[in-house]
Amino acid sequence: MSSSNSPFKAIIVGGGPIGLAAAHALHLADIDFVVLERRPAIFEDRGASLIVHPHTLRVLHQFGILDELLPRGAELKHHLSFTADGHVFSEGNRYRLIRENHGHGPVAFHRAELIEIMYNGLPKPAKEKILTDKKLTSITTTQDGVTATCADGSVFHGSIVIGADGVYSRTRQVMRNLALKENSTRPWDPPHPYTATYQLIYGSFPSPSPAGQGYDTQSKGKSIMYFSGPERGWFFLYKRLARPTSDRTNYTEKEIDALAAEFAEFPLTKTVKVKDVWPRMLGAGLTNLDEGIAKHWSFGRIVLVGDACHKMTTHLGLGFNHGIQDVVVLCNSLRKALQAAPDRMGPDTEALTGLFEKYQAVRMSSVCSLEGDVLKSGLETRLHAWHNVWSYLLSWYLLALNVVENLFMRFVMAPEFRKGQVLDYVTREERMKGKISWIYPMSYQAKKED
């Protein structure tokens, strides 16, 4: 870890899983921070599941929380594909192949439990920097720093702002306003840079089947993803919208119930249908399923991570994993820049602008898998919902073949997973060992520095 004791300070907006990941990474780099979470509590029993792939388990191991996490999740081991009438038309090997290739299968966690463990895994001094009921209203930037103001009147001073506040990021909105205020003619992203082609009901319920199942149900215009954990099951019910939209839609409980009724007879497993679990829901929500990548991830001393700058569909379970990669790439660069800074105040605005632009360029390059994974996630959503005749033919006749899935996992997904980066200043024993080596070994930078 760095021992520079620099007064450089990051203001993290958002106390969700990506904001907490940034807190872990900055703490391990000995960089000061504060987290501003708009909700009254860091972890609330809401939301559905998050799928964590092996390259992300490596980073969580660096955070020191892997052994606490794994017993609370379910490694996915069994995959089936159904039609809406319950016919099984494919039994896939994807989870076994991921384990063989990378040392562990993907793990399904209840989102709230993952957040709780991430929070509790921080030492007490770091936890004290995580504040709730702090809804960001404005950001003021100068050549020397930033000031974030919250709705309750509280003011926070720092060196940079990291926007980890999700798909409807307030940080992104404020950043856009500042950029256009400086130059109203400059090209910039629209207020909401993503587009939704599908809407999604997500929810959790007492698990009706053994842990480790990851099933899908396919039909024209509708599809389901189902995962089973140790205590909960989770589903994602997808329906194609009448037309794509970039508008934010707030749905009512009545609309949620009405859409769920359309899926009542759809299977989750060979013996369980949606109607069997709906009366026992522990929580559910309805949202538009946004997709896209923002063109601008930073402005001056403000930078975005996670869903604030890129959003993919929940198929393939890659969204959280890419948010973690944002944090890793950004914090590796920040630490190096602080070590190289001529004084303890850290890089100036010009240097930070360059650093943030390079961070985005790396994440958008072939060194990382972000662009391809946004496309692949959206493609799988469309394949499962038989978006057109080609989607139906591919999903039903070609991709259902195990030999095709094996080739896809080996030559498409595995090369992307192995690109996963780790914190280059944290040395840990490699826990994820499979047939395919990692491009970035666990302590590759530490060895170079030694």
Image (cartoon, grey):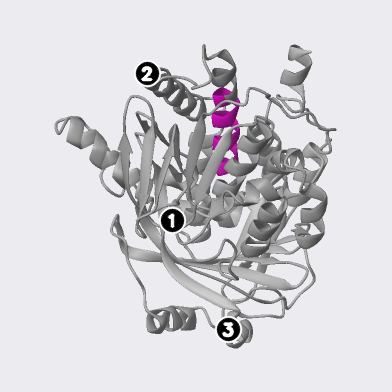
Query: In the rendered structure, does residue 120 fall within the stretch colored magenta?
Result: no
- Counting from the top left corner in percent of width and height, residue 71 is at 82, 59
Label 1 or label 2, whichever lies nearer to me, is 2
Tell me the quarter of the image containing the N terminus.
top right
| Residue occupying image coordinates x 33% and y 42% | 139
| 108 relative to 272, above or below | above
At horizontal 64% and vertical 73% (from top left) the residue drawn is 268
Residue 9 spot, x, y in % from top left? 51, 34
Return the residue found at the far left.
Answer: 185
What secondary structure is found at the residue carrying circle 2? helix
Asked if disc 2 and disc 3 are in contact, CB closer than 8 Å, the reply is: no
* CB within 8 Å, label 1 to label 2: no
Q: Quadrant of residue 426?
A: top right
Nearest the eye: 131 or 304: 131
Instruction: Provide the major secondary structure of the magenta segment.
Output: helix
> Mark 2 or 3, which is nearer the eye?
2
Q: State the residue position of label 1.
A: 389
- Residue located at (48% from left, 63% from top): 39
Q: Tell me how far mark 1 sits from mark 3, CA to CA.
A: 31 Å
Magenta residues (range): 321-334
Residue 330 is inside the magenta segment = yes
What residue would you read off at disc 3? 278
Left or right for 369, reference 222: right
Which mark identifies residue 350?
Answer: 2
Tell me residue 343's x, y (percent).
52, 15
Crowd rating for badge 3 (residues with CA inside 10 Å; few <14, some 14–19, many 20+)? some
Quarter of the view holding residue 227: bottom right
Nearest to the observer: residue 96 or residue 118: 118
SS state under label 1: helix
Residue type at mark 1: give it: Val
* Badge 2 or badge 3: first in the primary sequence: 3
Quarter holding the C terminus is top right
